[in-house]
Image (cartoon, helix red, strand yellow):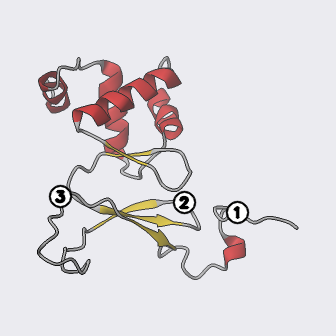
Amino acid sequence: MTRIGQHLSSCGLRSTPQRQRVYAVLIENRDHPTAEEVFLRARRKMPGISLATIYNCLEALVRSGLVRQLTLDRGAARFCPNMQEHCHFYCDCCGKVFDMPVPTTSDLGLNDAFKVERIDLTLHGRCPDCHLRPASQCAGQTLTFNQ
């Protein structure tokens, strides 16, 4: 049995080919895809898989602790297979998400009276590929309203 299969079994979940495929998609390219992006990638090797199955697989992987679900602003949930403590950087220009190291509690300015158990931090800005682009050349991530 594979490592993912053993982990799912230890959580009381069945290891299915679909769950294995979805996890493989997340591991192959650690770019924090949405469920729809996972669906499109999984279909390449498993053409019969449905979007509903993708959502069910992602839910099982999150529940088992193999994957984190990220919600950035009001966008679609994204999925991250990196279970080490880390933060995220969201590029407001191109929409890519990057794993970042966790700041220490001293970096956060907390005194010893606070006991940090988990950090859920997302930094927003422009990635190295986008930082020199004018806002008008961003991929439409910023909403503008006509008056």
- The quarter of the rendered structure image containing the N terminus is top left
Q: Amino acid at mark 2?
A: Gly
Residue linked to disc 2: 95
Q: Amino acid at mark 3?
A: Glu
Q: Nearer the viewer, mark 2 or mark 3?
A: 3
* Spot occupied by residue 8 in the image (x, y as percentages of width and height): 19, 26
Is residue 136 shown left or right of residue 71? Answer: right
Task: Between residue 120 and residue 40, name the one nearer to us.
Answer: 120
* Element on which disc 2 rests: loop
Rendering quarter of residue 68: top left
Farthest right residue in view? 147
Residue linked to disc 3: 117
Q: Nearer the viewer, mark 1 or mark 2?
A: 1
* Spot occupied by residue 77 in the image (x, y as percentages of width and height): 47, 44
Q: Is residue 46 visible?
A: no
| Disc 2 packing (10 Å; few <14; some 14–19; many ≥20) | some
Is residue 67 shown left or right of residue 134? Answer: left
Residue linked to disc 1: 143
- The residue sitting at 36% across, 30% down in the picture is 59
Residue contact at pointers 2 and 3, CB within 8 angstroms: no
Q: CA distance from mark 2 to mark 3?
A: 28 Å
- The residue sitting at 58% across, 82% down in the picture is 132
Q: Amino acid at mark 1?
A: Leu
Q: CA distance from mark 1 to mark 2?
A: 13 Å
* Element on which disc 3 rests: loop
- The residue sitting at 24% across, 68% down in the picture is 102
- The residue sitting at 57% across, 63% down in the picture is 94
Task: Between residue 146 and residue 132, name the one nearer to us.
Answer: 146
- The quarter of the rendered structure image containing the C terminus is bottom right
Q: Earlier in the sequence, mark 2 or mark 3?
A: 2
